[in-house]
Image (tube, helix red, strand yellow):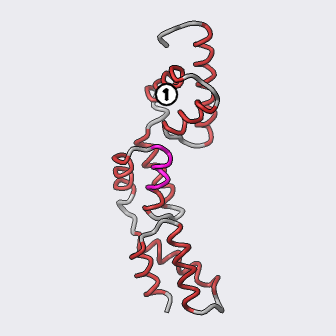
Amino acid sequence: MEQSSPESQQLFKKAKEVVFRSLKYRPRSVFELQKKLREKGFPDPVIEETIRYFKTSGLIDDRQFSIGWTRSRLGKPLGLRRIKQELKHKGIDTELIDHAVETATDLYNEADAVRSIILKRKNKYRGLDRQTVRRRLFGYLSRRGFQTQTIIKELNQVVK
C-alpha cells in the first residue's frame, strides 16, 4: 500500500481475510467482492489495494469467473437469457459475458435442454387440460431464461 501506516496495513489484512472467506465458498466477481468490502466499511483505497492483490495473485478473474458461472448454470439447466442477466447483476462487463457464453456453449443446444425439461415436468401436470399444461410449462421455462421461440417450438412438438 502507498501509505504503510500500521492502521492501513491492519485494514488491508482484515480486508484480505474477508475476501478469502468469501472465496472459500465459491468464486466471486470483482464487483461482488468490492460490494462486500464496502458493506464491511472498508475505505476505497483499501478495497482497491485488496482487489489488486487478489487479481495479481490470480485468485479473482472476471473472465474465468464468467465462464465457470455460465458452465455451471447451463448444467442446471438455465437459458442463456437468465445466465446473462445473472452475470450482469454480478457486475460482469458485457464483453466478458458474451465471451463466456460463446466459450461455454460450444456443445450446448438450448432446444435439447428445453425438450428435456418438458419431458421431465409434463407428468407433474397429468390430469390437467392441454392449454393449462402448456401455459405452466411455458411460464416455468420462460422464468429459467429460455428463448420464447425455442419454448414454443418444443412445446408444439412434445405436448400434443
Residue 46 in the image: x percent, y percent?
Answer: 54, 21
Q: Tell me the element at label 1.
A: helix
Q: Main secondary structure of the magenta part?
A: helix
Q: Is residue 158 magenta?
A: no
Residue 68 vs residue 136, the one in the foreground: 136
Q: Vertical placement of 122 versus 142: above or below? A: below
Residue named by callout 1:
51
Residue at 63% across / 22% down in the picture?
14
With respect to residue 142, does 134 lie above or below?
Answer: below
Is 88 covered by the magenta stretch? yes
Q: How many marks?
A: 1
Point 45% across, 49% down: residue: 88
Q: Determine whether, in the image, residue 151 is placed left or right of residue 24.
A: left
Residue at point 57%, 78% (across, down): 120
Residue type for callout 1: Ile
Establish if 106 lies above or below 147: above
Q: Is residue 118 left or right of residue 125?
A: left
- Check disc 1: other Cα within 10 Å, few if <14, some if 14-19, many if 20+: many
Snapshot quadrant of residue 139: bottom right
Residues rendered magenta in the picture: 84-91
Locate residue 27, reporting x and y percent: 54, 41
Q: Nearer the viewer, residue 67 or 92?
A: 92
